[in-house]
Image (spheres, helix red, strand yellow):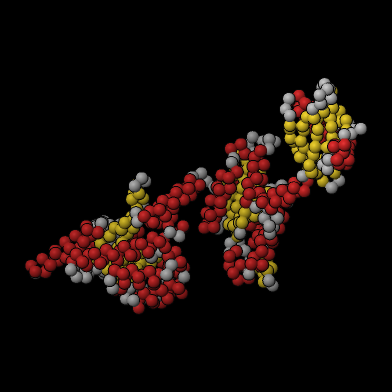
Amino acid sequence: MAPPWLTALPQPAALVEWRGNSICFEYWNDPFERYFGEMARGNREQDPERFGRLEAELIGFALSGHQVSRFELERLTTLGTEAFDCTLAWVHHAEPGKSRILISAIDRTADRRVEESLRRELISDALTALPNRTGFGEAIEMILGQEDHADAAQIGVMIIDLMRFSRINEALGTMAGDELILSVAARLKSCMGDEGATVARLGGNEFGVCHVFKNGVTDLMDMAARIKAAIAMPIRLSNLQISINCAIGGALIRISEAEADELVRQAQTAARAAKKSDRLEIYRAGELGAARQRFFLESHLRDTLQQGGLHLLYQPIIDLSDGQVRGFEALARWSHPVLGPISPNDFIPVAEESGLVVQLGRWALHDAMRQLRLWDEALGEPMPVKMNVNLSPIQMARDDVLGTISDALRLNGVNGDRLMIELTESAVVGDPNNCGMLLDALKRSNVAVAMDDFGTGYSNMASLQSLPIDLLKIDRSFVTDMIADPDKLAIVRAILSLAKTLGMRTTAEGIETADVAYKLREMGCDYGQGYYFAKPMGADEAYACWMERRNISTRLAASG
């Protein structure tokens, strides 16, 4: 007869006799009968795997000498798998051979199902039910962990970035955006067919595909072409039929050499390149290193801007008719205490990509105006020069440019007619309406405007005529060696003629020889800038350069 305390226990429980090298279920209560009765009677056929597990745990406990042991046991039912936390403990008796093993179980099935549900939510996208970024990484890890791949098998990851998605959200609303995402998800799954590829939504308008490619890059390119064609098919949203495009970047590597996180990062790097090139891009060695270098520079640049670690150099702008310094271009420079001098060609693109160019532009403008004020104080009167400051298209789009310029002028007591803002052609062409309003406002403040690097962008006669631009800066690529190159000479002559027709002044950049300077003056160019006259220099040296050229001119006038 079972002990009364055993039958009174609410959870499944049983007493097990240890017979040398075997076990025998001696007594058990009704809950144990309901869940594990067949096991207790020794019926292995119902669930042989779990019976063997239970038997092994009991024998291992009996031989271990431990007083308590815990393990988890599952039970198969028609409704699914049930899970139990089991505890083994000795029930000692004074008489030899009378001690028994007590096994008790607590049903954790409900908890397990909640955990599984939360787990599914953790690794799945709520809208599409596809794996999310976490689930995608686990899927890649699972493929890498399989042992049945050929030695030369390659795993590939593609990142698909939907173009113009934000515009659709803004124009049609988020519900239409969700409908678009669902349509794209369905098309991607359809593209995979029976190939067994993993499709995931990594977030927003970004999807991922992972697959083992037998023929390497050829198969990856074929799949990318199918994806691009499927997504390009018109989609009906809110009674509108629209077409979208996508940028696809891929990364491919032998499975034996792959790491999941690295593979995804490589594909994302390629996808960023694909957004610019509008074609499939496959990651090449070194690209991720360059991306990490940009991130490294961004981190240091952010700290440097906060700590005031940048400085300005000033390159003189020379009047070609009399050799006088008529202005300076303020140029940002960065000398890191550990990394040393960092080229503007390296940190300016990083600043634009990260948005730090807004903070950088504000600092440059205020520091340049402060320097004008210091020169005025040294001279005892306003120094008759303009200060040229570059304005990034990113800053134009994101910053209160008029307010920033107004503050810089007002705080330093400098009049607007001593400032010239330099814009690139891409800034003018990219948003001509907003650019026109900004330039009109600058003109009302007497601030002059120069179009920098003219001839390398996409300006046309209409934009030049309609915008209040004061000066064209001829790009150095046309000025260098122009005397020996008839094509360059013809381009420079055409730009000078165009500027004269439109009533604009001109500055030639990159003048490195006296012959080029003389030829430009002969052709009617107003100003020159380049190493022939002076390299970019510090504030004191720039002031001395202006003073020296003024004194020479004064002496020449007196002797004449």
**Is residue 271 placed above or below 321 in the rendered structure?**
above
Asked whether the viewer can see residue 87, the reply is yes
Q: From this viewpoint, which residue is outermost toward the bottom?
A: 444
Residue at 52 percent across and 46 percent down: it is: 284
Which quadrant of the structure image shows residue 40?
A: top right
Residue at 70 percent across and 55 percent down: it is: 129
Quadrant of the drawing holding the C terminus: bottom left
Q: From this viewpoint, which residue is outermost toward the left?
A: 559
Q: From this viewpoint, which residue is outermost toward the front?
A: 94
Residue 557: % across, % down: 11, 69
Q: From this viewpoint, which residue is outermost toward the right?
A: 1
**Is residue 194 placed above or below 545 in the rendered structure?**
above
Residue 395 or residue 522, whichever sits in front: 395
Residue at 69 percent across and 72 percent down: it is: 239
Asked whether the viewer can see residue 457, the reply is no
Residue 503 or residue 381, whichever sits in front: 381
Which quadrant of the structure image shows residue 102?
A: top right
**Is residue 434 placed above or below 164 in the rendered structure?**
below
Residue 533: % across, % down: 23, 59
Residue 262 or residue 380, whichever sits in front: 380
Residue at 57 percent across and 49 percent down: it is: 267
In screen coordinates, is 100 left or right of 413?
Answer: right
In screen coordinates, is 125 left or right of 104?
Answer: left
Which quadrant of the structure image shows residue 375?
A: bottom left
Number of numbered tags placed on the structure image: 0
Residue 75: % across, % down: 82, 40
Residue 45: % across, % down: 88, 34
Quadrant of the drawing holding the N terminus: top right
